[in-house]
Image: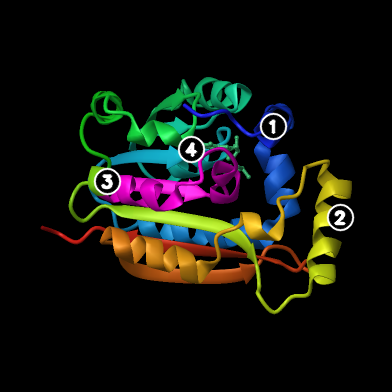
Amino acid sequence: MGELHSDAREFDGFARRGYEEVFNRAFPFAYAEFLDVLETTLLQYGAPLKVIDIGCGDDWTASQIAERHHGHYLGIDPSVDAISNLEEKLQSQPSLNVAGIAGSAEVLENEDFERISGTLLLGKPNLFICNAAVHQIKKSWDQIPTMVRRAFEMLSDGGKLILGDYFYDQKLTSAEVEITRNWIKAEYGQTPTPREGFVDPETMRSYLEEAGFKVEVFGKTQAREGLTIEYYVFVASKPQA
Ligand SMILES: C[S@@+](CC[C@H](N)C(=O)[O-])C[C@H]1O[C@@H](n2cnc3c(N)ncnc32)[C@H](O)[C@@H]1O
């Protein structure tokens, strides 16, 4: 596993405060969009879920899933505190069997990962999630096309990937981007990712299609009223063989 970027350590602090408190409050429109897409997607699943959530953060996403469906969930995130929260808060929760791996998305390239995840999920994943994490993952592992391709290869036929992240529109001036970056720093104490650290939606769409995915849903919103940063989310499926 490569060296984690120093920004990744900030997430242990955010995990102690709770991601809902930090990220949902900071970017409410983005999280409302994600939740809407997650909810609609879960309605399409009859069988038990087998979810791999890359850059999962703490228990927030798993709790949302557990309220709506049942099955198995494996979260991967380098923040040890976030993974502890995930496992502790969901351990007595009956609908979703939850496991966490404290590590980088890079684990997808590890030969043993498919076997380990298969044991934990009792089979191949039928849903991958990667929300609000691509810009963080890129800091230590700049191989997002590989991440997308591995998700495609690992998914069962008909399985889906929900992938959302932030971006700055190309038309914004640097000054307009800086206003938002300064707000993030002042309000949340987070090291704001530079504009070029994000993957824009057009590029992400090309990664998805090159991997073999069929894009089913594309949503986009301002992340928060008054901020220039935006959020997009794709639901992409692996066609039946
Ligand atoms: C903004 S949070 C999003 C968390 C969660 N997915 C959500 O929707 O609330 C970004 C997450 O990316 C994680 N992260 C940073 N570097 C990573 C890497 N190399 N691999 C996987 N996750 C990483 C951070 O620890 C953090 O939990």
3 or 2: mark nearer the eye? 2
> Can you identify the residue that label 4 sits on?
62
Residue 45 visible in the snapshot: yes
Question: Where does the magenta region start and end?
Answer: 126-152
Q: Which of marks 1 and 4 is nearer the N terminus?
A: 1
Q: Is mark 4 within 8 Å of ligand 1?
A: no
Mark before the other along the chain sequence, 4 or 2: 4
Residues at discs 2 and 1 in contact (Cβ within 8 Å):
no
Quadrant assignment for ligand 1: top right
Pointer 1 residue = 6
Q: How far apart are marks 4 and 2 (CA)?
A: 31 Å
Measuring from the top left, give residue 18's x and y in whole percent.
69, 34
Amino acid of disc 2: Asn
Q: Which residue is drawn at 40% across and 53% down?
A: 145
**Residue situated furthest left in the rendering:** 241
Q: Is mark 3 on a helix, strand or loop?
A: loop
| Mark closest to the chain's N terminus, 4 or 3 | 4
Residue 70 lies, in percent from the top left, at: 34, 39
Q: Which label lies toward us, 1 or 4?
A: 1
Query: Disc number at residue 182?
Result: 2
- Res. 190 image quadrant: top right
Q: Residues within 10 Å of mark 4 (few under 14, many from 20)?
A: many
Q: Identify which residue is drawn at 47% across, 67% down.
A: 203
Describe the element under mark 1 as helix, strand or loop: helix
Q: Does residue 22 appear left or right of residue 209 in this picture?
A: right
Residue type, mark 3 in image: Asn
CB within 8 Å, label 4 to label 3: no
Disc 3 residue crowd, few under 14, some 14–19, many 20+, Cα 10 Å: many
Give the Cα separation between the discs numbered 1 and 4.
26 Å
